[in-house]
Amino acid sequence: MYDVIVVGGSYAGQSAALQLLRARRRVLVIDADRRRNRFAATAHGFLGQDGVAPATIARQARDQLRAYPTLDWIDGTATAAEGQRDGFAVTLADGIRAEGRRLLLAQGVTDQLPDLPGLSDRWGRSVFHCPYCHGYELQGGRVGVLANGPMSVHQAELLTEWGPVTYLANGTDPGDEARAALTGRGVAIEPAPVAALAGEAEVTMEDGRSLPFAGLFVASRTTPNGPLAGTLGCAVEEGPVGPYLRTDGMKETSVPGVFACGDIARPAGSVGLAVGDGTFAGASLHRSLVFG
């Protein structure tokens, strides 16, 4: 039996695993290789790794974890979990079953994007959600924000720090209050419906016009990856961009012995935040093993 089974081997999961391995605990990491930022060429805003490819950061971390003899790693998808504190079992898609005293959920989230031709093809390349991760690289060029809910107005207001912003209402009415907030920040409002995206970051309107931008932003909705949290009965909170797992001050979920970290357990995230969250979760989980 493992001390801890970590479901999700991206930045948060690996960071948590590192703390546990350094405490000489037996750790199994199950990873489906679906990092949220796998579409981006480079990661930014993470101290010491600014501008490095996300895959490189993840690979270097995994290579470092492998130096610890108490690590087991399975490339696969966890499909079911059951049990209770000190006696959990996780089943993988290929039928492998693993047992552990604690579970750490770090599967991350999936971005739900607007159904607009050309958008998903450019996600992480010229269409983004985080200005701190990608705004600087636009070099002060024109920024478009595609309306996708209440958070889009906040996103457009904030992005004026990185360049002139156009709020693409896409045929929706932002309302008087939002309109006043946008214009107060110098945001231009384009009311016409959007037909598709083309080129690098060019918006084709339904009336035939083409609006070029240095980059586009959309406030995507997120959903937790995988069924485990639901089948275990972990409570969720509703955040500004979607649901996330409720955890206490020690990163334990509402289910005793089940911890969570990273994007699946935060209202918003980035690589830096995921690593920090994982570090704390790993140390907290270790304390639960020591002190019961």
Image (cartoon, rainbow, N blue to C red):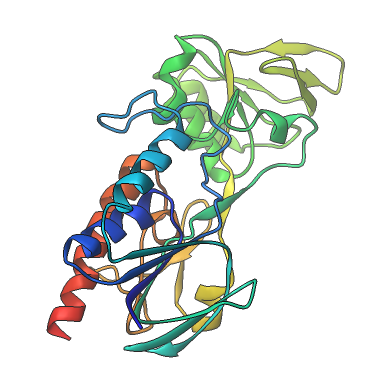
Q: Would residue 115 be found to the left or right of residue 57 on screen? A: right
Of residues 246 and 41, the one nearer the viewer is: 41
Rendering coords of residue 203 (x, y %): 73, 19
Taking the spot 56% from the left edge, 50% from the top edge, the residue there is 34
Of residues 220 and 263, the one nearer the viewer is: 263
Position of 56 relative to 1 (above/below): above
Taking the spot 39% from the left edge, 19% from the top edge, the residue there is 161
Taking the spot 18% from the left edge, 60% from the top edge, the residue there is 22
Q: Would residue 65 be found to the left or right of residue 182 on screen? A: left
Of residues 131 and 45, the one nearer the viewer is: 45
Of residues 196 and 164, the one nearer the viewer is: 196
Position of 213 relative to 89 (above/below): above
Number of numbered markers: 0
Rendering coords of residue 111 (x, y %): 59, 48
Taking the spot 53% from the left edge, 74% from the top edge, the residue there is 228
Rendering coords of residue 181 (x, y %): 47, 30
Rendering coords of residue 257 (x, y %): 32, 82
Question: The N terminus appears in which quarter of the rendering?
Answer: bottom left
Position of 289 relative to 164 (above/below): below
Q: Would residue 127 be found to the left or right of residue 98 on screen? A: right
Rendering quarter of residue 206:
top right
Question: The C terminus appears in which quarter of the rendering?
Answer: bottom left
